[in-house]
Image (tube, rainbow, N blue to C red):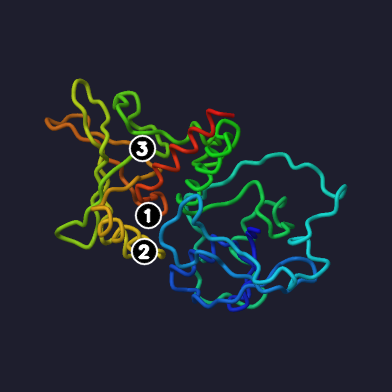
């Protein structure tokens, strides 16, 4: 059973598995951190699975699970669920992708009794969460939104599920756009989550990375492959830089840099230039998600499932 929230004793904080994952990679939470169930009258110990895995797929993602089912209290609604007839049907609410983190999101040592950053920013409907995965969530990393995209694609709900992002609330289907052969004049300045296959390599003059998509935008009669640069200065001030570098270095070592890139940005091209080029500017590494090529198989499989429904 997948449990989404737990109480962490070291930080005296109730947190989601996603937050535990980020704190671990920001070196603010140890691999041996202890977690307990948040059910009523329950202190059953929990494990945060996949905490040290730099990659994420539909099957590999952070979540809490029980060490032993019998450790849960009889009053624990996390294990036993809410009694029938006591819970009203929930109206679907949009997920939320926060474009900036709170200033104290990665505070080193929270004061006793201080509510978690995650809890403090939840909507009232989710504050009373049983600890089970709820319908809507707040996210700070694009990787989490991509996870939901893959899940909705698998479930055939891309056209119904929505996410609040950048002042708008599009469906997941409208938000994600592939870079392949779209006309630059039609999409210049269109902010979306653009995605496609690419190659990542290290920059020669600094400890950063250069990304070039394998598929192209169309500029008149020409085709131009978009690029992204992640400079050393941008990465070094990023609290979860250890995770970012672990993912990219692993891809370079294992696949020659071949990957699938998702980026929240708008394509930019100079108004007047002899050489045609398109760039995505990323000023926050939270707004880019770079995955191994195995995600292509997930996309193929979920596409077939969606068509079959």
The Cα–Cα distance between marks 3 and 1, rounded to whole angstroms, is 15 Å
Give residue 14's position: percent from left, percent from top. 64, 67
Specify few, some or many for label 1: CA neighbours under 10 Å numbering under 14, 14-19, or 20 or more. Answer: many
For the C terminus, which image quadrant? top right
Residue under circle 3? Answer: 266
Dots 3 and 2: beta carbons under 8 Å?
A: no
How busy is the neighbourhood of tag 3: few (under 14 within 10 Å), some, or many (20 plus)? some
The residue at which mark 2 appears reads as: 241
Give the spatial CA distance, label 1 vs label 2. 8 Å
Q: Image height check: is 264 above or below 116?
A: above
Q: Nearer the viewer, residue 94 or 202?
A: 202
Give the position of the N terminus as an image quadrant: bottom right
Residue 259, compared with residue 274, is above or below; it is: below
Q: Are discs 1 and 2 less than 8 Å apart at CB?
A: yes
Numbered circles on residues, count: 3
* Residue lying at 36% horizontally and 60% vertically, measured from the top left: 244
- In the picture, the disc for residue 190 is none
Query: Mark 1 — residue?
Result: 285
């Amino acid at each position: 059973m997948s449990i989404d929230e737990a109480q962490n004793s070291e930080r005296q904080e109730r947190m989601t598995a996603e937050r535990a994952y980020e704190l671990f990679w920001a070196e603010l939470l140890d691999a041996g951190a202890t977690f307990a169930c948040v059910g009523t009258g329950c202190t059953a110990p929990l494990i945060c699975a996949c905490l040290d895995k730099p990659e994420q797929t539909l099957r590999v993602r952070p979540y809490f699970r029980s060490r032993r089912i019998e450790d849960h209290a009889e009053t624990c609604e996390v294990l036993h669920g809410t009694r029938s007839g006591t819970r009203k049907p929930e109206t679907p609410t949009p997920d939320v992708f926060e474009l900036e983190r709170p200033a104290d999101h990665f505070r080193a040592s929270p004061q006793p009794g201080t509510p978690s950053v995650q809890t403090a920013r939840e909507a009232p409907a989710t504050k009373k969460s049983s600890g089970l995965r709820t319908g809507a969530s707040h996210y700070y990393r694009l990787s989490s939104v991509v996870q939901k995209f893959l899940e909705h694609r698998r479930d055939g709900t891309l056209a119904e599920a929505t996410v609040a992002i950048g002042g708008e609330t599009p469906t997941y289907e409208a938000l994600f756009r592939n870079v392949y052969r779209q006309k630059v004049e039609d999409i210049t300045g269109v902010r979306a989550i653009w995605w496609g296959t690419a190659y990542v390599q290290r920059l020669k003059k600094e400890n950063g990375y250069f990304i070039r998509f394998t598929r192209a935008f169309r500029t008149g009669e020409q085709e131009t492959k978009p690029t992204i640069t992640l400079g050393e200065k941008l990465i070094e001030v990023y609290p979860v830089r250890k995770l970012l570098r672990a993912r990219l270095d692993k891809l370079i070592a294992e696949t020659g840099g071949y990957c699938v890139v998702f980026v929240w940005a708008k394509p930019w091209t100079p108004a007047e230039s002899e050489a045609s080029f398109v760039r995505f500017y990323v000023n926050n590494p939270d707004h880019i998600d770079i995955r191994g090529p195995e995600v292509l198989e997930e996309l193929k499989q979920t596409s077939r499932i969606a068509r079959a429904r």
